[in-house]
Image (cartoon, grey):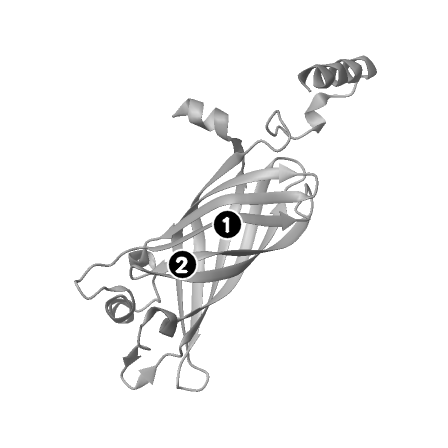
Amino acid sequence: MPRLWNAVLILFAILGIPASIFPATSDEPGKPEAIQIEHATATFQVGTNMPGLFVKGKSEALQARVQIRRSPDGVTLEHIEAQLPVKTLATGIALRDQHMREHVFTTPDGQVPDMTFEGEGISCPGILPGHEGSCRVSGTLSIRGTARNFSVLLKIREAGSAPAFRAVGDGVVKLSDYGIEQPSQFGVKTENEIQFRIEFPETTATALTTQAGRQ
């Protein structure tokens, strides 16, 4: 394969075609790459027993590490880990934030573990340079130290001008799945289902061998 690629480069040089028109992906097709994501956004919205009243929150501290493998049909998420510090979730009202952390995220022994997600072996066909594809990402979501099966629908787009990815996902979390009672404050009680969205900024994939060499 390297000899063939070198021959192609020589041919392009003769014809005056710059090799830079090709994305700088890993040297071998199907070679695993890593995506390290910092400061992604997570937002949520939950209805209440009061008509038209919703509680909304946001965090910009979502982190994720994704190991991917490309193929002619798309990409495979070989492993994905995501972490959200719950103390960074804010609704705009400090008292409500404190109430949320105490009643939703605090364990019986007073700990406030981060929310985490982990999945592997997820096939995402149709995600090619310049195209957007949908991918059902399944794994385990841990809230308050309790892990449950969970899935989220991601829309992933690979930039055509560089080996970079951008993703947006929507999902639903049921408090009852984690043994969490619906919070109530001043007569306002939230619903059991929480709608949430995650947005990963455009991030470049790096060959794992290269990244390991830097560590």
Q: Residue at x 65, y 46 (%)?
A: 127
Residue type indicated by callout 1: Phe
Give the crowd class for mark 1: few <14, some 14-19, many >=20 residues within 10 Å. many
The secondary element bearing badge 2 is classed as: strand
Label disc, if present, on residue 186 of the rendered structure: none
Q: Which residue is mark 1?
A: 200
| Residue 62 at least partly seen | no
Q: Which residue is mark 2?
A: 141
The secondary element bearing badge 1 is classed as: strand
- Which residue extends farthest left? 109
Q: Give the side of residue 80 with respect to residue 181, left or right.
A: right
Q: Give the side of residue 148 with respect to residue 74, left or right.
A: left
Q: Residue at x 29, y 59 (%)?
A: 145
- Image coordinates of residue 13 in percent, x first then y, are 77, 14
- Image coordinates of residue 66 in percent, x first then y, are 48, 43
| 136 over 35 or under it: above or below | below
| 85 over 97 or under it: above or below | above
Residue type indicated by callout 2: Leu
